[in-house]
Amino acid sequence: MDKPNEKLIDAKQKLAEKKSAQGVGVGTDAPKKDRLPPGQRLVDGWPVLDLGIQPQISTADWKLEISGLADKRAFTWQDFLKLPQTKLTTDFHCVTTWSIYDAKVEGVLWKDFIAAVKPESTAAAVMFHSYDGYSTNLTMVDLAADPQAMLIHSYDGKPLERIHGGPVRGWVPTLYAWKSAKWVKGVEFMPKDKRGFWELRGYHNHADPWREERYS
Ligand SMILES: Nc1nc2c(c(=O)[nH]1)N[C@H]1C(S)=C(S)[C@@H](COP(=O)(O)O)O[C@H]1N2
Ligand SMILES: [Mo]
């Protein structure tokens, strides 16, 4: 197993702390309405970002474990494909300033996932856990507020590539891309919000690109 790229992680954390101290990218009350969020640029292709680890998980080995405030269970690949499947076209915005338009993705809408998993009503937040040790947190309210929030397994009509988090990754396109966990292996329902990997290292807890919620 590869090791996380500590140098890169440190550099990103330092940048977040510096920007935050300058009051840059810490959010604004007035969200912009343009399709391209402020400070972003449209790029060709789809960049790849990770911690220096790209886990290789076959669909046969892949499992999605449910923990916390819901009945403990694990979805196999077959179980996952039996959930209602949806195709969507969405934009996607990374805090490092690239954006892509019209990503054609397929998978399970968050609302359909929730209907199958039936978390307890006391679940207020979710932690997505990944095979590379990554994690990211979202509130149930934010997930419900994004009609395009999904767990995806396909892109452009083809299985999601390993470099982009296949077999299955989170997809929450109304928030910066670090909220979309690649190589998802667990969904934990929590009684209250708790910070994930980048949220603990200077990134904004909420991550709305139209409010430039980059750093905290
Ligand atoms: N498991 C995992 N998920 C992750 C990351 C990661 O390092 N590990 N990086 C996040 C960040 S910072 C970004 S910008 C997007 C990048 O997704 P992409 O490589 O498919 O563009 O994945 C997010 N999800
Ligand atoms: Mo990112």
Image (cartoon, grey):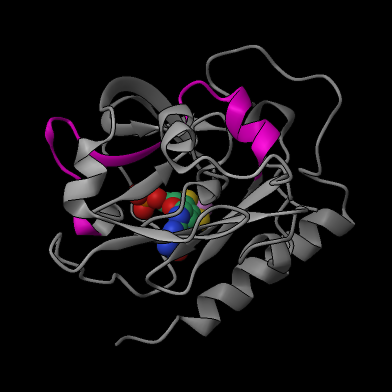
Q: Is residue 149 magenta?
A: yes
* Looking at the image, residue 51 lies above or below residue 25: below
- Front one among 70 and 204: 70
Q: Is residue 38 visible?
A: yes
In which image quadrant can residue 65 be found?
bottom left
Q: Is residue 80 magenta?
A: no
Q: Position of residue 167 (x, y in %)?
A: 22, 54
* Looking at the image, residue 209 lies above or below residue 215: above
Q: Is residue 39 visible?
A: no
Q: Which residue corresponds to the image point at 41% horizontal and 37% vertical from the top-left?
A: 116
* Looking at the image, residue 92 lies above or below residue 88: below
Q: Which residue corresponds to the image point at 42% horizontal and 45% vertical from the top-left?
A: 170
Q: Position of residue 149 (x, y in %)?
A: 47, 31
- Position of 153 compared to 8: left or right? left
Q: Quadrant of ligand 1?
A: bottom left
- Position of 76 compared to 97: left or right? left
Q: Which residue corresponds to the image point at 63% horizontal and 62% vertical from the top-left?
A: 198
The magenta region covers: 139-162
